[in-house]
Every structure is written in structure tokens, then in C-alpha cells.
Amino acid sequence: MEKIKIGICGYGNLGKGIENEINKSLDMELVAVFTKREPDKLTINSSAKVVNVTEIAKWKDKIDVMIMCGGSATDLPIQVPEFAKFFNTVDSFDTHKKIPEYFETVDKVAKENNHVSIISIGWDPGLFSLMRLYSNSILQDGSTYTFWGKGVSQGHSDAIRRIAGVKNAVQYTIPNDEAIKKVRAGEAPTLTTREKHFRECFVVLEDGANKEEIEKQIKEMPNYFDEYDTTVHFIFEEELKENHNRLPHGGFVIHSGNTGDNNSHVMEFSLKLDSNPEFTSSVLIAYARANYRLQKLKDYGAKTIFDIPPKMLSNESDDELRKKLL
Amino acid sequence: MEKIKIGICGYGNLGKGIENEINKSLDMELVAVFTKREPDKLTINSSAKVVNVTEIAKWKDKIDVMIMCGGSATDLPIQVPEFAKFFNTVDSFDTHKKIPEYFETVDKVAKENNHVSIISIGWDPGLFSLMRLYSNSILQDGSTYTFWGKGVSQGHSDAIRRIAGVKNAVQYTIPNDEAIKKVRAGEAPTLTTREKHFRECFVVLEDGANKEEIEKQIKEMPNYFDEYDTTVHFIFEEELKENHNRLPHGGFVIHSGNTGDNNSHVMEFSLKLDSNPEFTSSVLIAYARANYRLQKLKDYGAKTIFDIPPKMLSNESDDELRKKLL
């Protein structure tokens, strides 16, 4: 079997997760890792080439799919529209509000260059979006709820770390079990932000920092914490490193709807993940496979998870899928 | 908005469920119901025409999608290959073992006649198949488990009713909570048929029937009950009619898999349905919409749920979907 040639752009948690899975993959091979760092100083876990990202265009014809592993704030909005000139791409752009604009930008470049760019892949946006679409299309008379957690929110942890006097911090988003119970029972409750999730923070202070003042700053932080019930624990750095060094996450998409003479139905999809970046990597890889299939069909342009026929994620034939999984 | 013109072939629980939902639909209209019965003697719940199924070919150009609502044992394998000559079809053929052969037969007819035939739609086969595909493609190093219930199995209820001395019967399939717990914990247990599900039967006897003998016959019935722990309750007809007259069902697809350095992830999809036929109707309607979209693309032939881009189920534009659901 001819293997799909993969490039990784960005070697953080996500890039490492992808490398790890491709090392085990039967239908893909990792060709090169592109990094902003000095290639000589980066040790990776495979025999792929390490290349400075400024050289990326030279690899134009050597890579079938470039998996873009940068962040959504500053990397992806710059890199993807630029690199879609040279490559078929998959990314995990996750700033929900900016997706429509980002889609248009990437779509234009991809179409002009006969490339396929699959955007906003992962679990939310991603698999959770898919569940929202399936459930809303099937039970149109219904309500959909998304709950996140229990898991580490990188954005909220970062926000705490930016407070003067904070040395380190980890923030967990925790869904409210009582709210989930109501939704599961088909009650279609009206829930405020505060009723859906709690926030729990583990914070290491700099010497001499003011506990009360910092706790107040966290709890009142606009957008991040002010609309939530937040608990703050001050702990020592060793405890943070020992007990809060992993990146678990997960969540629930629950849709309840009615048909006929008041019959109620509940559709639920949930994820429980030991490692958010490793699971996201696995989703990106499956969509890299779909990207390759779309190239063969010359179906160019930007695509989202909504556009992709499910079978394209698999490395089995249509026949096998009908036999084994239908 | 131009409405999708729908036909219903077969007016049992499924056909009635479809009629009910299409009455509420914004983008579809029910044109005709085709029945084996005398049309004059059939009262329906809409203003659609009632037509004897022998006249179906005359409606060739008046219907965009024919939803086939017959049974998998004797109706669909005969009707769909015949009617796919005249119509674009959607069906819920659910004899898992025979799907590959059925697909080939329908595919040939649909392609020869420039029609789209979406087969085996519902929740299993259907949405559960989809979850098996997504989860296996994403976490390739993993195990998938499907549990059904708690719900009424029509096949098992029928099997009991065929026993001499049985007047009426309802059988519930019940998943084993202990087994589900192990699977959810990512233990990937090896489970026998007996360990996955229980069977509970509510049976009304004919006068003078032998309780012990019938209970033995049920519990030892090959394929249906012999590999399960089965409970049999003998009750009066009134109780059966009062407490067991609905068709609830549901189930779970749970996939656990690993990435990286022994990180475990669990993906779970579940359904809890008050009415199995009404929910199945809703799935069929969403795929009738997809059928119409595929016709516009001239993408003819037999299709399964694996082939259909998720966005085709929705009546919203791609733009709206990206804005609202991604």
C-alpha cells in the first residue's frame, strides 16, 4: 500500500501527539516536522526530517497533507492562508466566532491552488459540532446542550498565570451534574452560564503575593470567570507538578427532542479523554486521511467536518465497512 | 422554498411516523401513501393521496424521494430493487448479514435508472454504525461495544407469540449495567452474549396453556433466548395492553482506545427513545433530504450512511451551519 506522506507544522503537544500516532500508522508516514526553532536543537521521536518553517515551500511536492499544529490565536490565521498555497492542510482552528471569516480566506487560497484545506478539526469544534448537526437535523423539534469537562482549560489557566503574583496555575472546567441530569431527562431546561459549569483553580503564588487580592481578581475576571461559580485553591508548586500535570478533558453533547404524540427522545455523545492534545491529534490524523481522498476526487477548497463523508476517515474499503461496521 | 415531494410506501408504525413528521416539516410535502390494502379502506392523517401499491409506477415523475416503510424480511428485498427503477428511495433494511448483497442488488438498479437509493437507515444499522465508523477511524487502537435497550424487540416478541398456547407477548432487551461500567472504564473486557444483555418477557397465555412448559420453550429457544439469562412473567392481557403498549428502545455504542504513553479515551454515543418507530422515521426523513441533495449532484447508485456528508441532512445552508453549529 502506498503511504500518505504527512508533514507536521508546529511541534508542541499536538505535533508530538500526531508524530506518535503516525509512527504506529499503517497507511501514513511522517516526512518532515517544520518548526520555528533551530532544527538542530529540536529532538523528535521519529526519523522524519526537522526543518525550519521558513523553508517550508521547498517541500511543496514531497508532502500529501500538512497537519497544522500551531495555535488559533496567532499561528493558524497567518500560516494556513499562506501555506495552503503549497500544501493540502488540516488544522484545528478553534476560535468559534471567527470560523466563517477564516473559512472564506482559506477557501479562496485553496481553490486558487487546487488544494484541499480541512479546517477546525478536533472535538469542539469537530466531533461535537458533528453531533450538534446530526441531532438537530434528525430531531428538528428539540434542544441541544453542550457541556465541557471535567478538564483543563488552557485558555483559563493562561489567564490566571497572567495575573501579577501568580507563578503557575491550572484551571478545571467542571460540568454541573444536576444540569446534565435535567437535560438527559428531556426537560429542556433554560440554563444560565453559571448553572452549566463550575470552575476550579489550582494556583501557585510568587513569594509575598496577596492571596485574598489574587482570589478576588480571578473570580471577577470578565469573560473568563465573572459569570461562573469559581473555587480557588492555593497550593505548592510540587503539588501542582505532581497532581495537575496532565491535560484530561471531555464533555457531552445532549439533544432532546419530540415526535408524534409527545414521545421524547434523547441523543447523547460524550468524550472522556486522558489527554486532550493526544485525542485531538487522532482526530486530525483521521481527517488527514479524508484530505487525501478528497484530493484524489479533485474536490478542492476549504472543508469543514460537515462536508466530509464519514467513510473517508477509514483506511478500509467501502465493501469492508459495509460488512464489518454497518 | 420549493418543497421536496415525498412518497411513503407502506403504512405501518414507520409510515405513520413519517407522515406525522412531514406534516410538521418546512421543506417537504407528502404527496402519496402507497399501500397493499384497499385505498378506500385506509384512513390517513394528512391530505396525501392513498394509492394501491400496484399503481406505484404511475407516480414516477411526481415524487422526489420514496420512503420505503416495509419490513426487512419480505417487503424491502423485493420492493426496493423493483421500485428503484422508478424512484429515488430511502429504506431501513436491517438484516445486517444480508446488507452487502442487498447493497449490490440495489446499486445496480439505481445506477441503471439514474436514481439515488439510500439503504439501511435508522439507528442500528444507521446512527450506531456511524459511531462505530467514526470511533474506529479515530482511535484505531481500541475496542467498540454496542449495547441495546432497554427496549422492546419486535423480533423476540414475535418469536414468543409463535409458541402454541401464547396469546400475546412483549420482550424487553436489557443491557447489563455492570458490563457497561467496565467498558466505560476503558477496561476493554471480553464479554459473552450472556454477559452483555438480559431478556425479560411479559407473556399472556391462552386458556389451559402449560406455564412451565412454555417458560421452558422460551428460555431454550435457539438463537433468540438460549444464550441469554431470560426472565418470564405471565400476566393478564389487560396488564399487557396497559403497561407494555409502547415501543421504547435505545442503546449505547462505546469505544475505548489508547494513544501515546498509555493514555485512555472513551467515546460514547447513546440513544434513549420513547418510540423506536417514530425516531427511526425522523432519521429516514433526514436522509430523504440527503437523497434529494445527491440527486442534484447526479451522484447516483446505492448509498449507505457512511457515504453521506453530514451537512446534507440539514435544511440550512453551509454558511449557516458553520456559523451556528460548528
Image: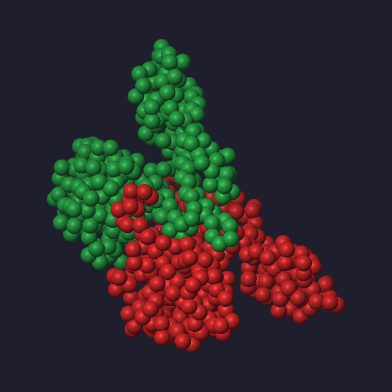
Chain colours: A red, B green
Residue most extreme to the right: A208
Q: Is residue B312 left or right of residue A22?
A: left
Q: Position of residue B245 (x, y in %)?
A: 44, 33
**Coordinates of residue B301 in the picture (x, y in percent):** 23, 57
Which residue occupies the extreme top position in the image?
A: B208
Between A206 and A5, the one lying in front of the other is A5
Q: Tell me where residue B217 appears, x and y as whole percent.
A: 41, 20
> Measured from the top left, where is residue B190 in percent x and y?
51, 41
In the image, residue B160 sits, relative to residue B270, either above or below, namely above
Q: Nearer the viewer, residue A170 or B278?
A: A170
Residue B79 visible in the current orientation: yes
- Residue B112 or residue B141, whichever sits in front: B141
Residue A223 to residue B42: above or below: below
Residue at 54% x, 43% y is: B189
Answer whether residue A302 is visible to the viewer in this image.
no
The residue under the point 46% across, 60% down is B138
Residue A137 is drawn in which quadrant? bottom left
Q: Is residue B117 left or right of residue B228?
A: left
Vertical placement of residue A260 versus B37, above or below: below
Quadrant location of the N terminus of chain B in the rendered image: bottom left
A280 sits to left or right of B92:
right
Tell me what residue is drawn at x 54 percent, y 56 percent.
B258
Along the viewing direction, whichever of A25 and B236 lies nearer the viewer: A25
